[in-house]
Amino acid sequence: MKAIPLLIPDMPDADAISPYLRRLDFARRYTNFGPLVMELEHALARALGEPRPHVVTVANCTLGLEIALAALGLDPGAKVLLPALTFVASASAVFRAGLVPVLADVNEHTWLLTPEIARDALRQHKLGCIIPVATFGCPQPPAGWDQFVRETGIPVLIDAAGGFGNQVIGEAATVVFSFHATKSLGMGEGGAVVSRDPAYVDRVRRLSNFGIDLSLGLSTATGTNAKMSEYHAAVGHAALKRWHERYSLRQSLHGFYCDQLSRLCPAVELQARPRNGSYTIMQVALPTETSRDSVMLALADMNIETRRWYLPLLPDHPACASVATCDLSTVRRLGPRMLGLPFHLELTEKSVIWLCSALAKVLATTE
Ligand SMILES: Cc1ncc(COP(=O)(O)O)c(C=O)c1O
């Protein structure tokens, strides 16, 4: 069996992108909310379903989160709750917005920071905002967070970096997506901030363009440059054109993979996420008694690449060492067991069965 890489980006090829690039040659607009960016925002809003939300594209999800936080106008130093199990970008955005992260636990089955966990955290901390993460693409419950916002008045920004196609847009929570090349809708780099509130999306747009109010020609707030370029939007159009086809390939790969893991490696725990979602990551929890390092080495010997996604946990990164934490008992139990297996559209059913059988063999012989 050939080597099985962890992840292979699934991007549109040059032929698919070139008709959009040609439009740049005619329009001579390369950035600053050009026609391809504006059309992409409409197409993304359409793809997100009815009623269509308001969308502003950004250079990447990290900057999107930073300016989405800035647009809330929280007091400097306000506390923002986020899960200990996430990519460091979620915390960087909080720091860079002049706010203070507080790290919370996740649900033991979905591996999500839930509204219940946020309510518990509120008993200990005065919070200015919550950033629940759509962990490994698993969607956050929009109705649960809408209810939380109604009840507490605390704004919620869902970091759905890897959740495009899975994360539904609710009434009250803002959602931020990533279009990094490794995501299911890849544009190289890119992101979008999505909300039902047009005034809020206008504020985010202004902050993405140096804080300039175009109607006044004046910078009215401290912004940054987080705009998506027309080149990235060209890739975005080509990616969206084949989105439905790629989405259903990912759905069937995910369903088949879960079945094989349950059949061949029943002791391995899967994230409780919708089976018919579009994912790019297959992170599992190994049995408690198993040494993850030994499993990784044994799989590497068989040319199967693995990774500890989102690990170490945020509080174990030096940059977050002094950050306040809530009770992290679930994530502390889960973290050392988690392992990312290969997941990409070049996996055939045969290679999925082969790699699940390889994992089963390794688990039977590894302590
Ligand atoms: C949860 C989470 N947030 C933010 C990001 C950063 O996204 P971007 O690379 O678009 O800035 C990632 C990237 O994988 C992520 O997983």
Image: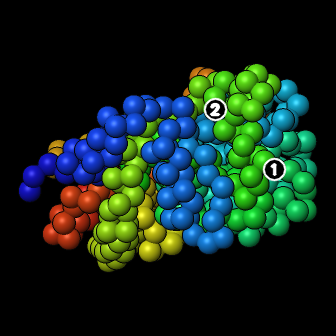
Q: Position of residue 261 (x, y in %)?
A: 33, 70
**Mark 2: secondary structure:** helix
Q: Is residue 209 visible?
A: yes
Q: Total label count? A: 2
Task: Kindly indicate the quadrant of the structure image that contains residue 244.
Answer: bottom left
Q: Is the residue 158 above or below the residue 107 in the image? A: above
Name the residue at 88% across, 31% down: 75
Q: Position of residue 95 (x, y in %)?
A: 70, 27
In which image quadrant can residue 287 be found? bottom left
Amino acid type at mark 2: Ser
Does residue 244 lie above or below 22 as drawn? below
Residue in view at x 59 percent, y 25 percent:
225
Label 2 within 8 A of ligand 1 by Cβ: no
- Which numbered disc, 1 or 2, marks the residue closer to the eye? 2
Query: Do tag 1 and tag 2 residues touch (Cβ < 8 Å)?
Result: no
| Spatial CA span between label 1 and label 2 | 20 Å
Q: Quadrant of the N terminus?
A: bottom left
Q: Nearer the viewer, residue 362 or 167?
A: 167
* Residue 91 visible in image: no
Q: At x 22% / y 61%, what residue is drawn?
A: 347
Residue 21 position within the rendered picture, expressed as x and y whole percent measured from the top left:
31, 40
Q: Earlier in the sequence, mark 1 or mark 2?
A: 1
Checking the image for residue 279, the label placed there is none
Q: Which residue is mark 1?
A: 155
Task: Give the labeled residue for mark 2.
Answer: 208
Decide if residue 129 is on the left or right side of residue 269. Answer: right
Task: Give the residue at x 76% y 54%.
Answer: 197
Task: Judge by depth and name the residue closer to the eye, 312 or 310.
Answer: 310
